[in-house]
Amino acid sequence: MGDRLQGYSLLMPVACSLLPVAFISQLDEYSMSKKVYIETYGCQMNVADSEVVVSILSKAGYEPTENINDAGLILINTCSIRDNAEQRIWGRLKAISHLKKQKNDLKIGIIGCMAERLKEKLIETDQLVDIVVGPDAYRELPLLVSEAEAGHKAVNVLLSREETYADISPVRMDKNGVSSFVSIMRGCNNMCAYCVVPYVRGAERSRNPESVLKEVKELFEMGYREVTLLGQNVDSYNWDNNSGNIGFPELLEKVAIIDPLLRVRFSTSHPKDISDELLYTIARNKNICKHIHLPAQSGSSRILKLMNREYTREWYMDRVNAIHTIIPECSLSTDMITGFCTETEEDHKESLSLMEWTGFDFAYMFKYSERPGTKAARKLKDNVSESVKSERLCEMISLQNRLSIKSKKSDIGMVFDVLIEGFSKRSFEFLSGRTSQNKVVVFPGGDFKKGEYVRVLIERCTSATLIGKCI
Ligand code: 5AD
Ligand code: SF4
């Protein structure tokens, strides 16, 4: 989370048709050499959104390129989930400020969650920023960029109850051409006490299933072999139409039957909503990956209640038991927060024991970061000291390292279907891919190509990778 994921830039050849003709031809010449660059921070949803943004700008005549130094417009797609994610963006703005000095016609836009949270304040705080656009206003980007080009500061942070960008075909920016994200819903209605997402991404809305299926079919035809269906809480996906209502299990199965060679993943499930019906759907479709990301956040029922998660430790354990029973080969990952308001040593030990009991294959672990405006910020005291949060996080990370190694060691001697994603990072003689359980496997290349499936016998492992040979 929070890392810079990718950079991309766009070329803007022609200006807005509302401008006087003489001005257009002047701009035309000037714009032909002017490029636009997008940097994406935060979650997979932001990666998917940047692809929508590129699509919208391409339709308005912009063309993608990748060099920030050539850019006449820089867009930063931001994350607000924790304070350090925002600090990273401020640092990045500082780091690119010299570009603005070199080119006084350079425009900088902040888009996404931090734009939504800070609104005009972003421009007041940092004069470098010319454009501020929230996650539901990307259709307005061409207009807002034109405004900025004309010398005005441009802001649109309106949230919408309907916008899903369903009709927009995202321009794919991944490098491998094998796996891609498809957004199936936006926003969140859950109101977990610590979380800023409902405030910056608005209310939950589901995307028309026909547009989801169309997008996935197009991806498959382009050669993609894995899609991850994205939503803040996919289990509450719901689409009503005349012929009835489609929930997430049904949508997932419709995607899976597009082609048996297409792997389907999804993120994120909510423990309070994940149903047996979903688990049976995963179990009966070979190409729905046997991995569930099921954020527990805490192992203490008292803390879960304060977090407004709407389940208890026992409920979470019941769901894990159901997963193991219905999909025995399923891997599990989680998100955990340490040092939430009033968390005691005993609560923390309950988080550790839940992790140990579940035996997570993977975990994202965070120190609690108070976010202004959330229920926790308004009603609870952020009273666990920074040093205690850090100590607890360290303890949690070392436990998870042990669990991750245990999970990989248990795969030694087993054979997995691996979807090849490309060369291994270390050597062109090795290929790298993933199992259905989302574990990375490295093996000697042979004649295989990315996008193909191979059967791999696992012979050994490191802390992050399974190593094997094709059989
Ligand atoms: N502080 C720390 N972690 C947070 N997350 C969400 N909000 C916060 C916060 N204020 C974590 C949760 C969530 C993941 C995406 O980020 O674990 O599942
Ligand atoms: Fe945030 Fe909770 Fe919604 Fe996830 S489910 S985005 S943690 S409010």
Image: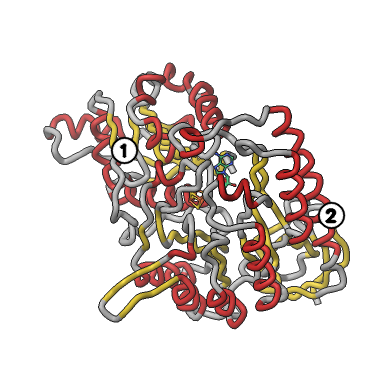
Location of residue 353 in the rendering, given as x and y in whole percent from the top left corner: 77, 53
Residue 183 falls in image quadrant: bottom left
Q: In the image, what residue occupies the spot 87% across and 67% down?
A: 459
Element type where label 1 sits in the image: loop
Q: In the image, what residue occupies the spot 79% across and 75% down?
A: 415
How packed mark 1 is, by other alpha carbons closer than 10 Å (few <14, some 14-19, many 20 or more), is: many
Circle 2: residue type: Thr
Seen in the image, is 180 located left or right of residue 407?
left
Location of residue 139 in the rendering, given as x and y in whole percent from the top left corner: 28, 47
Which of the pair 134/127 is nearer the observer?
Answer: 134
Location of residue 25 in the rendering, given as x and y in whole percent from the top left corner: 19, 34
Location of residue 393 in the rendering, given as x and y in whole percent from the top left corner: 73, 39
The residue identified by callout 2 is 462
How packed mark 2 is, by other alpha carbons closer than 10 Å (few <14, some 14-19, many 20 or more), is: few
- Name above or below for residue 202 compared with residue 361: above
Residue 239 falls in image quadrant: bottom left
Which numbered disc, 1 or 2, marks the residue that appears first in the sequence?
1
Circle 1: residue type: Val
The residue identified by callout 1 is 157
| Numbered circles on residues, count | 2
Q: In the image, what residue occupies the spot 53% across and 43% down?
A: 42
